[in-house]
Amino acid sequence: MTAHAWTLLIAYVAILTLLAWPLGTFIASVLEGRRHAFSWLAPVERLCYRLAGVRPEQEMTWRGYALATLAFNAAGMLFVYALQRLQAWLPLNPQGLGAITPDSAFNTAVSFATNTNWQGYGGETTMSYLTQMLGLAVQNFVSAASGIAVMAAVIRALARRSSATIGNFWADLVRSTLYVLLPLSIVLALVLVSQGVVQNFAPYQTVSLVDPHRAADGAAVTEQLLPMGPAAAQVAIKQLGTNGGGFFNVNSAHPFENPTPLSNFIELLAILVISAALCITFGRMVGDVRQGWALYAAMTVIFLLAATSCLWLEHQPNPRLAALGVDAAPSAIQPGGNMEGKEARFGPAESALWATATTAASNGSVNAMHDSFSPLGGLVPIVLMQLGEVGYGGVGSGLYGMLAFVFVAVFVAGLMIGRTPEYLGKKIEAYEMKMASLAILFPLFVVLLGTAISVALPAGRATIFNPGVHGFSEVLYAYSSAGNNNGSAFAGLGANNPFYNVMLGLAMFVARYALMVPMLALAGSLAAKKKVPVSSGTLPTHGPLFVALLVGTVLIVGALTFLPSLTVGPIVEHLMLHGGAR
């Protein structure tokens, strides 16, 4: 790794940590209904409740909370599906783009409602401005707010004693959107516009090429069509809400989405800043900030292990190119390392750090082709997704996903010391362990079953355009992404067809709600419990020992589940690349 790579990584984690503290404290104030910097917007909040016929003070049981969450998300899916199917007849469509096919519309509707933002289409050639704004951008807000809402319910369950309720979904949804996501997105969008990200409603612009050339058929190419649109507004929430869906096909590698090194670094921070801050929110809401810092430390350890690995691996030259005498050493005129599939203006350092951040969160945006990473460099983002994206994870979903691992960790620790496991004064018993196990195992099941079906059936194999182990890696990556609500992809897999649109759509749906519902059920059980006084036998859950136990639990579950499939894919490909297998 170069000095630039080390500096970038250290600066990134340091600034992220500095931002997490005040933002996490602010979000806790919002979710607890206390006064905060945007309390002057309270009349807007009350108007939202009045229009929706909601009484925010009326709390819900976990079943009511889960039904409200599912009903709201289902309505969002149906609306986005209908918008895509009807876009040819709707306004704000200057390019006259046609209706989306049923299978692609289904996949995209599920994708954006579940905070996955998997895209099997090219944004600038498929979606009208209206669909991008009213459908996709709106879901970017409310899917992220739904994750924060469920997280808030789980935290309340740990903080309360003998309670039958865990909060009001509609209040949590409105407050998260109005006070957290909207203000941050407005500020970030303005900053991005200042850097050159487009934000307009103009038709696409035809410009003359500076360097005309000839196409493959010999025809002269003298002009290029430049896509326009309200991109900055969607880019801001796509990053802050850990959504990741790009306005343009190549996502954050497109200069109209990510034009400068400063925009690149700011967007990188935006990907993880809310997820990191929610650890502090957790500590504030349970009344012990040390607990939040312990979760933050565990997430940071996982992130740093992945980031340093990916950065180091992508700074290594391709051995096949090195054998041909290609100079891949860093110098004043090149960044060195593996530059295949990477923007020259970013290089391996910014590309590898982005790949790590976007798969540590359920973001999925890209500024380089993950498919072109070295085999082990590409393994890092796959593993981060397969671990459940808990370092730092999606907005809200990352924290409650990590709490599922926390319950497993304290249960194992309780077995080792021979007493009933406890976490924050709540006993973790059989029911809680069943729900935590379901939350952890459902995404794992989706990834492995989906991959197996796709490589076994002719319909799944038909659009694997890279045969052999790399083709298997592409399918494994696709289901790891869909099965953990990430949205990034290895691009060599042709996924925009009825088979993959339906299969991946189902994977995204199950991965989101089969995790949410058990965690809400677990929250309902914990809220009803009394708190157990701390004793000499209580396992401290705020120190280095517990952090190590938690990280070990996450890594062991991932390794035991996915090591065989990783061996068949990226690990064998690495051995083949280095001449160890044929």
Image: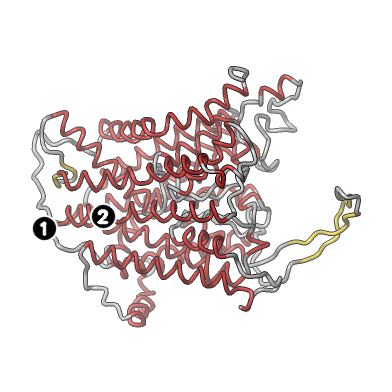
The quadrant of the image that shows the C terminus is top right
Q: Is residue 524 left or right of residue 150?
A: left
Residue drawn at (41%, 63%) of the image: 180
Q: Position of residue 79 (x, y in %)?
A: 48, 72
Q: Secondary structure at mark 2?
A: helix
Q: CA distance from mark 1 to mark 2?
A: 14 Å
Residue drawn at (45%, 34%) of the image: 304
Q: Position of residue 182 (x, y in %)?
A: 46, 66
Front residue (pair 405, 305): 405
Category of crowding for the residue at label 1, using alpha-carbon neighbours closer than 10 angstroms: few (below 14), some (14–19), many (at least 20): few
Q: Which mark is residue 577?
A: none
Three-letter code, disc 1: Ser
Q: Which residue is mark 2?
A: 154
Q: Is residue 325 left or right of residue 233?
A: right
Q: Position of residue 298 (x, y in %)?
A: 34, 37
Nearest to N terminus: mark 1 or mark 2: 2
Category of crowding for the residue at label 2, using alpha-carbon neighbours closer than 10 angstroms: few (below 14), some (14–19), many (at least 20): many
Residue drawn at (63%, 42%) of the image: 492
Front residue (pair 178, 442): 442
Q: Secondary structure at mark 1?
A: loop
Q: Residue furthest front?
A: 458
Q: Is residue 547 left or right of residue 259?
A: left
Q: Is residue 221 left or right of residue 302?
A: right
- Picture quadrant of residue 535: top left
- Picture quadrant of residue 6: top right
Q: Is residue 237 above or below residue 323?
A: below
Three-letter code, disc 2: Val
Q: Position of residue 347 (x, y in %)?
A: 65, 38
Q: Which residue is mark 1?
A: 162
The quadrant of the image that shows the N terminus is top right
